[in-house]
Every structure is written in C-alpha cells, then in structure tokens.
Amino acid sequence: MEPPPFSSSPAQLAERMAVSKVLHFRGRGIVVSADTLVVREGRIYPKPRDEEEAVSILRELRGGTHVVVTGVAVLGPDRLLVSSDQTVVVMRDYSEEEICSYVRSGKPMDKAGAYGIQDAFSPVGTFEGCYQNVVGLPLCTLLGLLREVGLHPTPSILLECSTCPKVRELKLESSLNSSARQRK
C-alpha cells in the first residue's frame, strides 16, 4: 500500500479533491463537497480496498498520532470557495480482537484511515481540534463558507460542534450579525 504521489500539502490535496467533486455538479445551485485524508508521518491512509488493508491500516495507526485533514468546497452561483480543517488525533492502544471485530462489521471500508471516530469501536483516545472534521465534514468550516456565498443557515448547526475551536468565533460573528440586523 503506497501513498499517492503529490507535490502539495495534505490540506491542498484535500481541497483539490473536494473542488474536483463539487465541479461535477456545476449549474445545479449551491453545491457542497468534502474530502477527508488521514495523514501520519507524510503517509496518506486512504479508504481501504479490502479487509486485509483495513486491518493493516488500523494496526499502523494504533497507539500513534496522526492528522485528519478535510477539504471543503462550496460552489455558489458566482464563485467557488474552498477551505480545509485539520485535527490532531491520538489513537488508543486497541487490541487485535477489536480490530478484527470492527473490520468484520464492514464499517471501516468507506472511511479514510479505516475508522470512524463516531463508531462504537471508539478507536480514538484523544483529539485536538474539530470532532466533526474527523467525522468527515467540519461543520464550522462549512457554515463559514455558506455564509460567504450568501446563505445563512441556522446557527443550531453549531450545537454539533461543542469541541470545535471555531465555535466561539462563529457564535460571536453570528451574534454580532444578529445585533447589526436588529439595529437597522
């Protein structure tokens, strides 16, 4: 299993992949796309091709630290916006039995790095940054981009982001915008 060659940073690669996806739907209104990468020591861990690769990836990530990078693209009526988010993740020292049981469940097969932070397997020990980024869609980043294209979704989306460092910034901005609209 070799990482794909790239000459840019993981963030740039994730953004490029998200843009590539979103452009397939050009002309269909406002379109959102995201792409997530798991990166450890310069190596990118993709979605596993098969159960054997899922086991191998989970063994390699076990007990170590990696970064989850998600690129988010929003295609609006007159512009394309892109951003990315990064979260540092420390995996717990799970057992071989846990790996095999999780892989047999089929859940790691559609996830970069062969795991989902939200799955009952609970492979993550700790993380620093945005939980939703590790899930695969950093909601605070998405909310910021949607606002830039003129959409103002309800800030209740932020309830899902209690651990995200961007929440305070977005809540403050939301409060300021509400106050300014009320004064007009």
Image: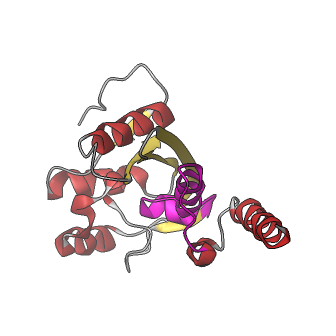
View extreme (front): residue: 184
Q: In the rendered structure, does residue 142 fall within the stretch colored magenta?
A: yes
Q: Position of residue 95 (x, y in %)?
A: 37, 70
Query: Quadrant of the image for the N terminus?
Result: top left
Q: Position of residue 142 (x, y in %)?
A: 52, 56
Query: Quadrant location of residue 125?
Result: bottom right
In the image shown, does 36 or 120 lie closer to the viewer? Answer: 36
Query: Quadrant of the image for the C terminus?
Result: bottom right
Region of the chain picked out in magenta, as a range:
127-154
Above or below, 44 relative to 76: above
In the image shown, does 93 or 102 lie closer to the viewer? Answer: 102
Q: In the rendered structure, does residue 110 fall within the stretch colored magenta?
A: no
165 relative position to 82: left or right? right
Above or below, 49 relative to 91: above
View extreme (left): residue: 50
In the image shown, does 32 or 85 lie closer to the viewer? Answer: 32
123 relative position to 51: left or right? right
Above or below, 55 relative to 119: above
In the image shown, does 74 or 108 lie closer to the viewer? Answer: 74
Q: Position of residue 16 (x, y in %)?
A: 39, 33
View extreme (top): residue: 7
